[in-house]
């Protein structure tokens, strides 16, 4: 069963993943001097402004996850909440691979998050270093909260 309140609760904090984020995250240090990978959404790619293109891609990614995520019945009954982090690599062509759950909540919740990311976030604009596409890791937090 899909739950409408997941949209507000799937707080990815996507902007913390952007180069323009004003935080001191280790991920930011890893991308210093590089362009981070970005979810590919064709309407966004037509935008000339990089910041607007990133915001558009982030929004499209969130909407796609929201549209396809659901709360596992067992986890809902047991009132299980938490954030699953799915880690994967994005190659120089923008193809994701090597998916793994790097932060677990519970097997059924992890499986839902992993499947949504694997099945629906399939095309990316690769990270770049000095304008050259490179392999890069990406960590996707998916938050499950009942209230």
Image (cartoon, rainbow, N blue to C red):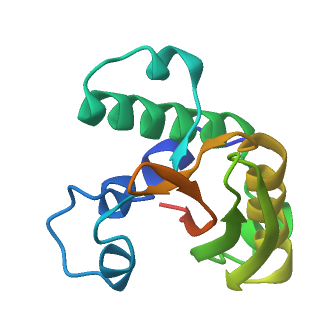
Nearest to the observer: residue 54 or residue 107:
54
Q: Residue at x 68, y 47 (%)?
A: 94
Residue 110, located in which quarter of the rendered image?
Answer: bottom right
Image x and y of residue 29, in percent: 30, 80
Specify whether residue 10 is in view: no
Instruction: Say whether residue 69 is left or right of residue 46.
Output: right
Q: In front here: 25 or 84?
A: 25
Image vertical order of residue 28 relative to residue 140, above or below:
below
- Using residue 50 as the reference point, say whether residue 20 is left or right of it: left
Q: Going by the image, does 82 lie left or right of 12? A: right
Answer above or below: position of 83 versus 132. below
Residue 2 in the image: above or below residue 35: above
| Residue 23 visible in the displayed image | yes
Which corner quadrant of the image does residue 141 belong to? bottom right
The residue nearer to you, when weighing 120 against 144, is 120
> Residue, x 39% and y 79% (percent of image)?
30
> Is residue 46 or residue 145 the one in the foreground?
46
- The residue depicted at 47 percent of the width and 60 percent of the height is 147
Residue 93 lies, in percent from the top left, at 71, 46
Q: Position of residue 115 (x, y in %)?
A: 84, 57
From what the image shows, is residue 83 above or below residue 47?
Answer: below
Q: Position of residue 42 (x, y in %)?
A: 58, 19
Quadrant for the N terminus in the image = top right
**How many numbered dots are placed on residues in this image?**
0
101 to the left or right of 130 = right
């Amino acid at each position: 069963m899909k739950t409408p309140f997941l949209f507000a609760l799937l707080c990815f904090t996507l902007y913390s993943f952007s180069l323009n984020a004003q935080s001191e995250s280790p991920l930011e240090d890893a991308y210093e001097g590089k362009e981070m990978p970005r979810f590919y959404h064709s309407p966004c790619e037509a935008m000339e402004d990089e910041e607007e293109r990133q915001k558009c891609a982030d929004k499209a990614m969130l909407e796609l996850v929201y549209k396809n995520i659901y709360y596992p019945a067992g986890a809902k009954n047991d009132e299980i909440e938490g954030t699953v982090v799915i880690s994967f690599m994005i190659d120089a062509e923008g193809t994701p691979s090597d998916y793994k759950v790097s932060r677990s909540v519970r097997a059924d919740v992890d499986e839902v998050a992993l499947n949504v990311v694997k099945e629906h976030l399939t095309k990316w604009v690769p990270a770049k270093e000095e304008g050259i596409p490179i392999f890069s890791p990406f960590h996707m937090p998916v938050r499950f909260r009942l209230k």
